[in-house]
Image (tube, rainbow, N blue to C red):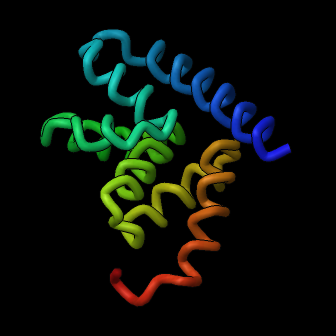
């Protein structure tokens, strides 16, 4: 059951990212390739973002884009910056972003075991 749930979430995340990439075709292919990897929870992609790409991701997230908020939350999780991950994941989940809801739920369970500012 968990296997099917994970594949469903992955497939849904991938379809959402393709929709996101259609919105901003003018942006670099490399940036969107990295974002797709981040959403698929490939931690190496989270570390491959340049400072400019990370800033661009934050701008998109701050503009209210649920896909970007989810990707930003995943980047923070990959870098083990758990408390920074909470807000973007919560914002995306609140907008009905299914993968973000799933990841935010897992985050809340993990948060119970974290010490402050770990």
Quadrant holding the C terminus:
bottom left
Please give left or right for residue 79 compared with residue 51 in the image.
right
Please give left or right for residue 12 compared with residue 73 in the image.
right
Q: Where is 83 relative to 59, above or below?
A: below
Name the residue rendered at 39%, 89% in the picture: 116
Q: Quadrant of residue 79?
A: bottom left
- The image position of residue 103, as x and y in percent, is 60, 54
Name the residue rendered at 70%, 40% in the picture: 6
Q: Where is 51 relative to 26, above or below?
A: below
Quadrant holding the N terminus:
top right
Q: Where is 100 relative to 5, above or below?
A: below
- Which residue of the protein is positioned furthest toward the bottom in this rendering? 116
Depth check: give the residue in front, 27 or 109: 109
- The image position of residue 18, as x and y in percent, is 53, 17
Depth check: give the residue in front, 76 or 42: 42
Q: Where is 58 relative to 11, above or below?
A: below
Please give left or right for residue 110 compared with residue 69 in the image.
right
- The image position of residue 113, as x and y in percent, is 54, 83
Depth check: give the residue in front, 13 or 62: 13
- The image position of residue 44, as x and y in percent, is 31, 38
Name the residue rendered at 68%, 29% in the picture: 12
**Number of numbered labels in the structure image:** 0
- Which residue of the protein is positioned furthest toward the right in this rendering? 1
Name the residue rendered at 35%, 21% in the picture: 32
């Amino acid at each position: 059951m968990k296997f099917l749930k994970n594949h469903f979430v992955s497939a849904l995340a991938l379809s959402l990212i393709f929709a996101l990439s259609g919105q901003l075709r003018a942006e670099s292919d490399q940036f969107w390739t990295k974002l797709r990897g981040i959403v698929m929870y490939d931690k190496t992609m989270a570390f491959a973002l340049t400072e400019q790409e990370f800033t661009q991701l934050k701008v998109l997230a701050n503009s209210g884009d649920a896909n970007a908020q989810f990707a930003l939350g995943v980047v923070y999780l990959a870098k083990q910056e758990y408390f920074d991950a909470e807000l973007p994941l919560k914002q995306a989940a609140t907008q009905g972003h299914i993968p973000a809801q799933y990841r935010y739920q897992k985050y809340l369970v993990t948060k119970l075991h974290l010490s402050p500012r770990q």
